[in-house]
Image (cartoon, helix red, strand yellow):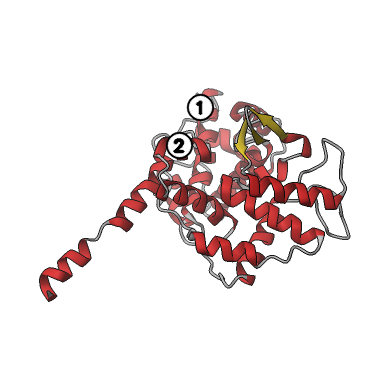
Amino acid sequence: MENNALILQQPGTLQAVQGFTSGLFERWIAYIDAKPKTVETYTRAIRQFATFLQVNGITEPTRDHIIAYRDALRANHKPTTIQAYIMAVKLFFQWTEQEGLYPDIAKHIKGAKLDRDHKKDYLTPKQVSKLLASIDREGREGLRDYAIIALMVTSGLRTVEVMRANIEDIRTVADFTALYIQGKGHEEKNTYVKLVEPVEDAIRVYLDRRGEEEPDAPLFASESDRNIGERMTTRSISRIVKNALRAAGFNSDRLTAHSLRHTTATLNLLNGGTVEETQQLLRHTNINTTMIYSHALERAKNNSEERVAKAIFG
């Protein structure tokens, strides 16, 4: 293997990191075989790592330098961001070693410790009812917003799954109506959620008012003057939910569009659903992710403090 410092300074590894001016970056992207959004994240991460090397005058990085980089990220980045950035560096040096360009100095380095507790709260049944009741359904926009929120809170859909849905994705399965969805990390719409009657009715009332009949049209369309009738973005869906929450009196940083998904899981478990059923409902690949909800409920039902207080105070 060539001298490490020379490799990093010649048109090659470090130049690919800093400016992506050579063909090495394209080769690395082909190596990681990631989706465009992941490529964008990793590109940003590698550029930031290159900046760290430049600012600190590092031409021959070592394992200790990567650890120092990780520690520097902690100053103004969330653990999930640190995890993604370190993963990009790890993949990059895996590749450089495989290509005979530079040793894998990032091997066995850990990212950030992630807190597995949920960062968002959920709603009680009464709060969900209040949220839905607060939406003005006189106009088309209100009918759409009501249908979106009712769908998300009963089926646990993510905003990206709502965004991707088309009218033709509403289909009959057995003796019920289903909405086929393209889940997180999936290329096709190969799974579905059941549309309970009140939700199906809300969607059909909205579609009838909208007057859209093209099967491949988005299930929920923008009402903005600039792009009316076009597919909504995940950001606009999140904003709709957040605005509705505020209007209903639930103005908290811990209540967002993702809270509706937490609500789905929690209410299912509270009302007799098993962990396995909840896993299938939320489409978790790992049941340990679903178990977080179960553990949280076990703690909520634990009345130890009351028993201790009763022993002390009578």
Near-viewer residue (9 or 131):
131
Near-viewer residue (283 or 9):
283
Near-viewer residue (79 or 5):
79
Q: Earlier in the sequence, mark 1 or mark 2?
A: 1
| Left or right side of 187 for 90 | left
Residue 170 in view in this figure: yes
Image quarter hosting the C terminus: bottom left
Residue flagged by tag 1: what amino acid is it? Glu
Q: Are marks 1 and 2 in contact (CB under 8 Å)?
A: no
The residue wearing badge 1 is 97
What is the crowding at mark 2: few (fewer than 14 residues within 10 Å), some, or many (at least 20)?
some
Residue 159 in view in this figure: no
Residue flagged by tag 2: what amino acid is it? Glu
Report the disc number at residue 190.
Answer: none
Residue 233: horizontal and vertical position, in percent? 73, 51
Residue located at (52% from left, 41% from top): 282
| Left or right side of 125 for 159 | right
Between the residue at mark 1 and the residue at mark 2, the CA separation in whole angstroms equals 44 Å
What is the crowding at mark 1: few (fewer than 14 residues within 10 Å), some, or many (at least 20)?
some
Residue 170: horizontal and vertical position, in percent? 72, 36
Q: Quadrant of residue 200?
A: top right
Residue located at (75% from left, 61% from top): 142
Near-viewer residue (211 or 5):
211
Report the disc number at residue 277.
Answer: 2
| Left or right side of 273 for 8 | right
